[in-house]
Amino acid sequence: MSTIIKDGQDDISRYQRQMIFPGLGADGQRRLAESTVILVGCGATGTHLAGMLARAGVGRLRIIDRDFIELTNLQRQTLFDETDIAANLPKAEAAARKLRAVNSAIDIEAIVADLNPGNVLDLLGDATLVMDGTDNFSTRYLLNDACLKLGLPWVYTGVIASYGMTATFVPDAAAPKLPGKRAATGCIHCALGDMPAPGTTATCDTAGVVGPAVALITAVAAAEAMKILAGTGDLNPGLIHMDVWSHDYERFQFPRRADCPVCGETPSFAFLDAQMGTTSTSLCGRNAVQVTTFGGGRLDLAQVERAMRAVSAEVKRNEFLLKAQINGYEFTVFPDNRAIIKGTADEDLAKSLYARYIGG
């Protein structure tokens, strides 16, 4: 869908202030309108990115998120409010509804799913650009594999405490397809090395996060997205680190590594190659674990509800998810074979509870 000129003066005037900016112009705005941006993760960074890109007029925005909204999210996740919590809405769906009211001229698609090796290529395949709104490195390294395989540019964004980081990655196969004669870059493995081991990096559990840090770094990342899509301006050539509290700013260069195991001379995709199985992820600041089985069919929530009512009187279901209280644990079950189990941070216990009450 074109968001300018096709529908007349109203659509032109919507973007007038950014179209008169020399760095974008009418041609750049038209390229935004012809683009498909896929946002993975719709929490703190994701809601800020989604809002800026929808208002900027990207033609199609697909929001992929696995989670539902909780009260602690409202401090920094800008698209949600208390009514979304009362309605038990997933983040992707709530964000899409809000953004359709902001800009009805673009296509916005909500995907309530966990991005995993079994679905990532299908979900990202038609993207012009991928934006990272996630909160964990395992998904980011999976994104890195998938974007290299598909030849897609992507923008990494992360925030913790009062600082944020962002970097732009352009694979060899993506560079010649982008407007503006972009140069290929290294990948996240070139920039950060092997994925950090659990417990070796700060998390929102241990360090917290302040809203202005989210706003600051996502503004930089959203500007990168607009430049990539419009084919104007110079892209960020390194890893940017900004601290909103101390006013520190640093940019680290990451030259492409010939021996990189992912984008080097003999590439392999370790995160992408795990096509079936069960995974678990401890969720930041939640005393909760997400358990996912992938490579099979979808869960029938009505069937799960019947089974859980045999052991619990506290079961609620809507079209997006099911919630149940069982033996002191809160289960939130999704049709894509996922459950968030609250009341434990023990991943082995969470997998056991999943198998006991859901199956798999």
Image (spheres, rainbow, N blue to C red):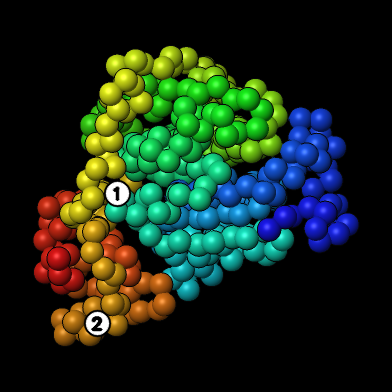
Q: Is residue 270 left or right of residue 4?
A: left
Q: Looking at the picture, which amino acid does disc 1 mark?
A: Pro
Residue 101 position in % (x across, y down): 68, 65
Farthest right residue?
9
Residue 322 visible to the viewer:
yes
What is the C-alpha distance between the residues marked 1 and 2? 26 Å
Q: Residue at x 54, y 70 (%)?
A: 83
Classify mark 1: residues with Cα within 10 Å, few (<14), some (14-19) or many (20+): many
Please indicate whether residue 70 sits to the left or right of residue 352 in the image.
Answer: right
Q: Please, is residue 340 above or below residue 37 in the view?
A: below
- Picture disc at residue 303: 2
Quadrant where the C terminus sits is: bottom left
Q: Residues within 10 Å of mark 2 (few under 14, many from 20)?
A: few
Q: Position of residue 328 (x, y in %)?
A: 19, 68
Tag 2: amino acid:
Gln
Q: Is residue 303 above or below residue 205?
A: below
The residue nearer to you, when weighing 141 against 349, is 141
Residue name at image x 56 percent, y 44 percent = 128
On residue 21, the disc is none
Question: Depth-wise, is mark 1 or mark 2 nearer the camera?
Answer: 1
**Residue 223 in sight here:** no
Which structural element holds mark 2?
helix
The spot of residue 330 in percent (x, y) is 26, 67
- The residue lying at 81 percent from left, 30 percent from top is 22
Mark earlier in primary sequence (1, 2): 1
Question: What residue would you read off at disc 1?
Answer: 117
Q: Position of residue 281 (x, y in %)?
A: 25, 49
